[in-house]
Each structure stands twice: as structure tokens, then as C-alpha cells.
Amino acid sequence: LPVYVLENKQEGARIIAGIIAGVIKEKQARGEMAVLGLATGSSPVKVYRELVRLHHEEELSFKNVITFNLDEYFPMSPDSHKSYVHFMYKHLFNHIDIDPANVHIPDGTLKIDQVAEFCNAYEDKIRACGGIDIQLLGIGRSGHIGFNEPGATVNSQTRLVKLDPITIADAIKDFGSEEAVPHRAITMGIDTILSARKIVLAGWGKSKSPILKKMIEGPVTPEVPASFLQMHEDVTVYLDEAATSEFT
Ligand code: F6R
């Protein structure tokens, strides 16, 4: 996997935002929609801040942008401050000129017997929009991308999954207690992610270093779902120096 190590995550975020802005402008120039696959969590926060800055200060428009988020907790109300819907509006959508009709985030309010149909429709919508032009990813300490936890298969698509104990433990900081963390989520699959034409992964901080090493140098295995990225021809990994601390 091609890896770039930046001095800090601010610098990394600026580069990633520049790449996303480039895709948007290239499509704009051709009068086409740009389809972005987006992530939540701490890793993309500064990327979104930079995209908002580009909108305010450098006239980057999102009028030709369609977005699909990777995942949402299940169950989860979009009105909850813990929802990924809330996160996306707070960090990005409230501050740019995207048409809300072009925003897609998995629905955490479904009844269990509606989930399969929703997930198939999510995949259909991505395809109907022409597929994802660029997918932004973080990585979880479990090795997940999206919420594809260890055991996820390469051909998996959007579906309801159980969260790994490591992921639940890491979410306690957001939810206050283990009991409050939803133990399930709806996530795009590995196949959905690998179908994106271009993929950028942001890995910041020392805590991600051991799993990043496995993703980059280890075998391709469902035990490290992020290792499936090695199968894609246009993935770039952006790390800060702390994220490389275990790479000896
Ligand atoms: C979020 C997502 C997850 C996160 C990962 C890292 O939409 O799909 O895979 O990217 O859990 O989270 P942070 O960035 O908070 O360390």
C-alpha cells in the first residue's frame, strides 16, 4: 500500500481535503456529480474542517456532490447527538452548500425486518449514482474499516453487523458506559468499499500504529479487514509520525 507520512494530522488532513476537492472540481468541470464515500469518528474531523474552509475561503462548491456515509450505529435516532447523522451535519453538511437530498447515511431507526431491504436499496443507490468516486476511511483498533469487524468477508455488502469488543470499548468515551454503546451497526461492506474508484485512509496517533502495521505489511486476511485494501489498485494511506511508532 502506498503510504505517506506527514509531520502531523493537520498537514495530512489538508492533503486529503485537497484530493477530495480535486475530485469535486474535476467532476464540476465536466458538468458531472461527484460521489463521495464519507467516514465519521475523530480521524476525518480536520479533513472536514479544511473542506469547510475551502468552501468559505476558496469558493469550493458542493452543489454537484452526492455523499454516502459508511455506517451508522443500530439502533440510533438521527436526532441523538451520538448519531453519525448528527456528526456529519455538525462537522460538514451544516457549513457547505450541499443539497440535503444528496446526503445518504444508513438509517439507525429501522425495524429489524426492514434492514435487509434498506441495505439492498443503499447498494442500489450507490450504483445508480455511478459508484463512489472517492472513499474516505479511518481505521479502528480492531482492524475495521467502516464497521467491517474481524471475520468480515471480501464480498460483503451493506448489512447489519455486531461491533467487535475493541470497538465497543473505544466507543465508551462517546457514550459514557459500555451499556450505553449500541452493539450493532449498519455498515457498507468490504465489497462496497473496494468498489470505490479511489480510496484514501487517514491514520493518526500512536494507538493506531499496531493495526496499521498489520494492514500495510501483514497478509490479506479477514482477521484484519483493512488488509483487504491491499487488493485495491488506488488506495493511499496518510499517517502522522505517531502512527508509525510501531513500524520498526
Ligand atoms: C466511522 C468508521 C470507522 C472509523 C474508525 C476510526 O464512520 O467507519 O471505521 O473510521 O472506527 O475511528 P476514529 O477516527 O474515531 O479513531
Image (tube, helix red, strand yellow):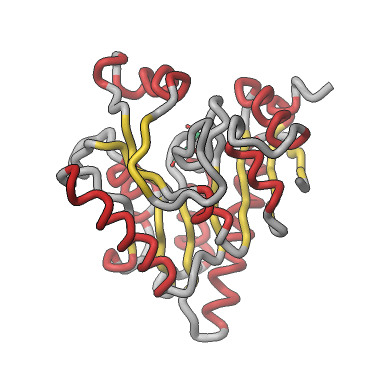
Q: Specify the quadrant of the image occupied by residue 186.
A: top left
Where is residue 168? Give x, y as percent. 39, 22
Q: Residue furthest left?
A: 111
Quarter that holds the C terminus? top right
Vertical comparison of 71 with 221: above or below? below
Residue at point 66%, 51% (across, down)? 15
Between 177 and 218, the one lying in front of the other is 218
Where is residue 54? Give x, y as percent. 52, 60
Residue at point 32%, 54% (across, down)? 119
Q: How many marks?
A: 0
Q: Residue furthest bottom?
A: 31
Q: Is residue 39 left or right of residue 1?
A: left
Q: Specify the quadrant of the image occupied by residue 212.
A: top right
Vertical comparison of 57 with 227: above or below? below
Between 55 and 162, the one lying in front of the other is 162
Where is residue 97? Give x, y as percent. 36, 66
Between 98 and 95, the one lying in front of the other is 98
Where is residue 137? Give x, y as percent. 55, 45
Vertical comparison of 172 with 129: above or below? above
Vertical comparison of 10 with 107: above or below? above
Residue at point 61%, 21% (across, down)? 207
Q: Residue furthest right?
A: 248
Residue at point 52%, 33% (across, down)? 151
Q: Is residue 16 left or right of residue 145?
A: right
